[in-house]
Image (spheres, grey):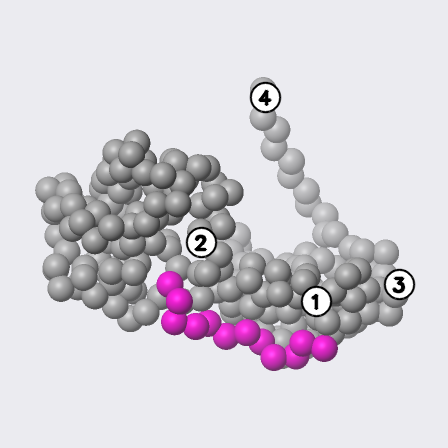
Amino acid sequence: MGYALKITTAKWYTPSGRSIQRERKFENGKFVETQPDSLETEAKKKSRPAYRSDAGRVVYGGGGITPDILVHDDTLTAAEQTLSKAFAPKSQDVYVTLYAYSLELSRNASKDFKVQPQWRDEFYRRLTGKGVAVDRAQYDAAGRYVDRLLEQRVARLVAGDSTAKRRDLPFDAPLRKAIEVMEKGQSQRDLFTIAAATHVVERPTAAATAP
């Protein structure tokens, strides 16, 4: 297989005249987003030009294609954020150690495996052996975060990405909300009606997200 690179210098518009292009700034030789998705709010979305689809649904221009329902990802706890920052300077060593250990675990793990406390202990031992200096109390305080890293990597090796994603569902707030809405609606029209009636922006919870 070959590769192709497509470059466009034009902006994209829908038939109603709405621009779906998100504005970007050119700084230090790079294009940067002026408004990351993670900072999108209903108020900011509604401050942009409003258009109506053929069916009369209100959509907003000038900010890319934003969701009808804004759901922020779940966030790390304070302890988990601290550990994640401690891992950052040695992220490559952390990844290599995680992958190698998970590969070993996957050889004897069933599809419905559960992360064992001794896995966490052994992972810590291997990290320190690799030169990743992390305080043990700090590591233990973020046990759920560590377990999730191990679970996701082992699950991918044992049963593939789809199984790993199903295991990760409790930590994926946008996907959980999408499933909730889809279960309530039987048609596209139903989904649009539900979305229009949803005015409250979902806020992050204390559930953890892996890096």
Q: Quadrant location of residue 110?
A: top left
Q: In this view, does 167 lie above or below 8?
A: below
- Find numbered disc 3 in the image and state the secondary structure of the residue it sits on: loop
Q: Is residue 115 above or below residue 186?
A: above
Q: Which of marks 2 and 4 is nearer the N terminus?
A: 4
Q: Which of marks 3 and 4 is nearer the N terminus?
A: 4
Q: Which of marks 4 and 1 is nearer the N terminus?
A: 4
Q: Name the residue under label 1.
A: 184
Give the residue type that dot 3 points to: Asp
Q: The C terminus lies in which quarter of the figure?
A: bottom left
Q: Which residue lies furthest to the right in this view?
A: 54
How far apart are the two marked residues, 2 and 1, measured between alpha carbons?
A: 22 Å
Residue at the location (59% across, 21% down)?
2
Q: Position of residue 161 (x, y in %)?
A: 47, 40
How far apart are the two marked residues, 2 and 4, measured between alpha carbons?
A: 33 Å
Q: Is residue 177 above or below residue 42?
A: above
Q: Quadrant location of residue 187?
A: bottom right
Q: Mark 2 points at which residue?
A: 168
Please identify, in this view, whether the residue under mark 2 or under mark 3 is nearer the observer: 2
Disc 4 residue crowd, few under 14, some 14–19, many 20+, Cα 10 Å: few
Q: The N terminus lies in which quarter of the figure?
A: top right
- Find numbered disc 4 in the image and state the secondary structure of the residue it sits on: loop
Q: Where is residue 169 in the image (x, y as percent from the top left)?
A: 48, 56
Give the residue type that dot 2 points to: Asp
**Which labelled disc corresponds to residue 2?**
4
Please identify, in this view, whether the residue under mark 2 or under mark 4 is nearer the observer: 2
Q: Where is residue 57 in the image (x, y as percent from the top left)?
A: 82, 69
Residue at the location (39% across, 59% down)?
209
How far apart are the two marked residues, 2 and 3, measured between alpha carbons?
A: 37 Å
- Boundaries of the magenta span: 197-208
Res 157 visible: yes
Q: Mark 3 points at which residue?
A: 54
